[in-house]
Image (spheres, helix red, strand yellow):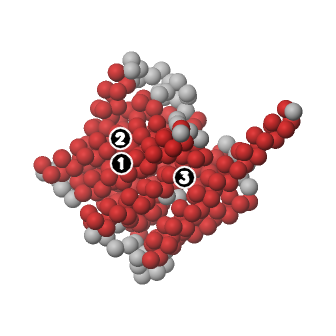
């Protein structure tokens, strides 16, 4: 029952993230990208500040300026900034497909940084997953869009954020981490706007879309938190890949995109590689548990 509940919340989170991306991409047509990102950060941080205060938690925690939290902030900036640029400059479908490689990079980072054991099967899955990414961006061919590299950089940022979150002091609640994650987007967006040299302009429709971005971003973040705290992680986590399905549907219906077969095939390879990696992790955990029980007997 707990696994079913956790899986449903993970699907809800991924649907909300896809809708958040849709609203942000649409808002960027009514205002500069930097302003859209800053307003998104402002709205999201305001909501999480309210939630943090409601639970009588500190906004400025004494351990805020520790190395893991600073690294997490830098990774959050990288992931959010470059993925926002990616979905505004490239099709939502291809950027979302590339994003599915994040769990593979997390496994790679855990092996390199935390010394986690990764067997040859998972190494092969990671390698095949990266081949899927290359199929989507297609470097060296006429259809290559240099802006697709932005999505690849965002994957590195989001993977770094997940790894830094793991290393963060356990005294921080998810609400506090949410505050910090959204707050850093405000100066990031403003810096991007100043760098672009664009004038300030917006519209009522753009502001409404930013509100939609904030609402679904908060829903996604909270649903993801519930999902990861309910049921077995190895059961719940594979449902992360439903985000690609939702993104493809929105890309076709809202933005009239028509992803080609190579993009779809590359996305499928990335997803299958990621799911296989998670299943291998699950099998390894079960084997370890069985060995412990056998030794205990």
In this view, the residue farthest toward the front is: 1
Q: Residue at x 59, y 41 (%)?
A: 232
On residue 297, the disc is none
| Residue placed most toward the observer, 185 or 133 | 133
On screen, residue 244 above or below 106: below
Circle 1/circle 2 CB separation < 8 Å: yes
- The CA span between labels 2 and 3 is 19 Å
On the rendered structure, is 258 left or right of 229?
Answer: left
CA separation in Å, label 1 and label 3: 16 Å
The residue at the point 32 percent across, 50 percent down is 20
CA–CA distance in space, label 1 to label 2: 7 Å
Sequence order check: which comes first, mark 1 or mark 3? 1
Q: Nearer the viewer, residue 259 or 204?
A: 259
Q: How many numbered badges does the structure rendering display? A: 3
Query: Of label 2 and label 3, which has the lower sequence position?
Result: 2
Q: Callout 1: helix, strand or loop?
A: helix
- Earlier in the chain: of badge 1 and badge 2, it is 1
Q: Secondary structure at mark 3?
A: helix
Q: Secondary structure at mark 2?
A: helix
Do the residues bearing badges 2 and 3 touch, measured as CB atoms within 8 Å?
A: no
Residue at the far left: name it.
204
* Residue named by callout 2: 219
Mark 1 Cα within 10 Å, few/some/many (few <14, many 20+)? many
Residue displayed at 41% across by 69% down: 146
Residue 16: which numbered mark, if any? 1
| Residue 57 appears in the rendering | yes
Tell me the number on the disc at residue 238.
Answer: 3
Provide residue 111's location: percent of width, then percent of height. 68, 49
Residue 48 x, y percent position in the rendering: 35, 31
The percent position of residue 16, horizontal first and vertical second, equals 36, 48
Q: Residue at x 52, y 35 (%)?
A: 229
- Location of residue 147 in the rendering, given as x and y in whole percent from the top left corner: 39, 66
């Amino acid at each position: 029952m707990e696994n079913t509940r956790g899986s449903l919340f993970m699907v809800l989170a991924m649907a909300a993230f896809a809708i958040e991306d849709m609203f942000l991409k649409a808002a960027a047509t009514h205002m500069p990208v930097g302003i859209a990102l800053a307003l998104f950060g402002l709205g999201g941080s305001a909501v999480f500040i309210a939630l943090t205060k409601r639970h009588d938690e500190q906004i400025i925690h004494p351990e805020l300026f520790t190395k893991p939290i600073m690294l997490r902030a830098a990774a959050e900036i990288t992931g959010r900034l470059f993925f926002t640029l990616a979905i505004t400059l490239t099709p939502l479908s291809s950027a979302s497909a590339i994003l599915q490689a994040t769990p593979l990079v997390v496994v790679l980072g855990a092996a390199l940084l935390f010394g986690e054991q990764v067997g040859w099967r998972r190494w092969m899955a990671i390698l095949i997953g990266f081949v899927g990414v290359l199929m989507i961006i297609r470097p060296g061919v006429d259809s290559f869009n240099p802006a697709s590299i932005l999505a690849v950089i965002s994957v590195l940022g989001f993977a770094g954020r997940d790894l830094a979150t793991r290393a963060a002091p356990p005294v921080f609640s998810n609400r506090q981490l949410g505050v910090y994650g959204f707050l850093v987007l405000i100066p990031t967006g403003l810096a991007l706007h100043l760098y672009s040299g664009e004038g300030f302009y917006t519209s009522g429709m753009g502001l409404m879309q930013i509100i939609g971005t904030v609402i679904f971003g908060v829903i996604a973040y909270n649903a993801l938190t519930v999902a990861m705290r309910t049921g077995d992680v190895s059961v719940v986590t594979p449902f992360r890949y439903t985000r690609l399905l939702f993104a493809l549907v929105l890309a076709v219906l809202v933005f009239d995109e028509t992803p080609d077969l190579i993009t779809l095939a590359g996305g499928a390879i990335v997803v299958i590689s990621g799911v296989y990696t998670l299943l291998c992790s699950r099998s390894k955990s079960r084997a370890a548990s069985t060995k412990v029980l056998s030794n205990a007997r």
